[in-house]
Every structure is written in C-alpha cells, then in structure tokens.
Image: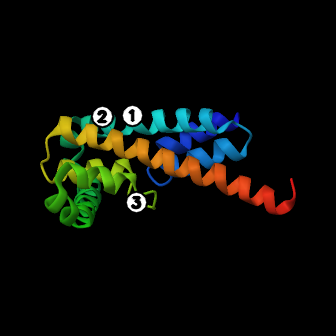
Amino acid sequence: MNSLIKAVIASIVPVSELRGGIPIAYFSGSGIILSFLACTLTNILVAPVFWIFLDEVNHLLLKFSPYSRFFHKNVERARKKIQKSIEKYEYAGLMIFIAIPLPMTGAYTGILGAWALGMNKKKAIISSIVGVIIAGIIVSSVCYFGLSAFNFFRGK
C-alpha cells in the first residue's frame, strides 16, 4: 500500500490522527508540504463528520447497552479532560487543546468534549479546524527540522 495512503488512514484513526500520519508520510519519502497537506486536510474532516456521528448515529446506537456503556464512559472521560480549559477559555481553549500534539488531545477528543459540553456546533468545528492546522504545522516542523538536525549530525 502506498505510504501516503497509509498516512491518510492514520490521520483518520482516533489514536494517531495527523500526529501519526505526517511522520508516516514524510519519513516514507513524501515531501513535507505534501505530508502536511494530505494529513492535515484529512484530519480536518474529522470534526464535522464526528459531530454528525454524535448527533445522528449516536441516538440509534444508544439503544444497545454495550455501546451505551462504552459511549458514556468515554464521554465522561473527555468531558473531565477538556472541561476546565473550555470553561476558562471557551473556543480558544478548544482550539489550543486540539492544537497540542500529544496523545488524546486531537480533533476526536476535542469535538467529543465540545459536543458533550453543549458548545455551539459551528464555532466548535471552526476551533477544531484551526487547532488541527496548528497541530499539523507543529508536527510537520518537528519532522522536518528533526530530520534535518539528525542528518546534520550524521554529516549528510
């Protein structure tokens, strides 16, 4: 499978998102611009699609107790994780939360928290998009400059 396709898939997966996708693409030979664009644009799609899932499909799936238990456990975890920064900084807090390229701080957790806290859909999605772009810039910069520094010390 093409490494760029693998990177795009990684950018959709909740655990890795673009934090995993960009390094996969870049270190497999895609240029930094292509890696950034493909993975960031893919990860941007998470916000509106996941919100639609939460609004529409969730109501149907809640009828099944295993899903209901899993969902409520994860909603509560996301709510606790994001509530303090959201209450204090509102949509800027959501954007910063999503922009920090650490595990479990991406678009999925941010949108889940925004949805669970009853935030405005349009403003939350815009905040998510800006946060994803910032995260993409950070991850791309670390990949690019990290590899450049590594090659410098290797004498290449």
The first of marks 2 and 3 along the sequence is 2
Find out whether the residues at labels 2 and 3 contact each other: C-beta distance under 8 Å.
no
- The residues bearing labels 2 and 3 have C-alpha atoms spaced at a distance of 18 Å
- Please state the horizontal and vertical placement of residue 145, each as a whole percent of the image: 65, 53
Quadrant of the image for the N terminus? top right
* Residue 104 marker: 3
Dot 3 or dot 1: first in sequence order is 1
79 relative to 99, above or below? below
Question: Residue, x 20% and y 49% (percent of image)?
Answer: 91
Q: Residue furthest right?
A: 155
Does residue 143 lie above or below 38 as drawn?
A: below
Residue 49 percent across, percent down from the top left: 32, 34
Residue 25 at least partly seen:
yes
User: Residue at 22% across / 42% down in the picture?
Assistant: 124
In this rendering, does residue 13 appear at all? no
Q: How far across and down, in percent of the image, does residue 44 sit?
A: 40, 36
Kindly identify the amino acid type of the residue bearing the numbered disc 2.
Pro
Q: Residues within 10 Å of mark 3 (few under 14, many from 20)?
A: some
Marks 3 and 1 sit apart, C-alpha to C-alpha, by 17 Å
| Three-letter amino acid code of the residue under disc 1 | Leu
Colouring scheme, one of rainbow, by chain, secondary structure, one colour: rainbow
Q: Amino acid at mark 3?
A: Met
Q: Residues within 10 Å of mark 2 (few under 14, many from 20)?
A: some
Question: Residue 111's x, y, as percent?
Answer: 28, 47
User: For this view, does 59 lie left or right of residue 66?
Assistant: left
Residue at label 2?
48
Residue that badge 1 annotates:
45
What residue appears at the point 50 percent right and 51 percent down from the top-left corner? Answer: 138
Q: CA distance from mark 1 to mark 2?
A: 6 Å
Tags 1 and 2 in contact by the CB under 8 Å rule?
Answer: yes
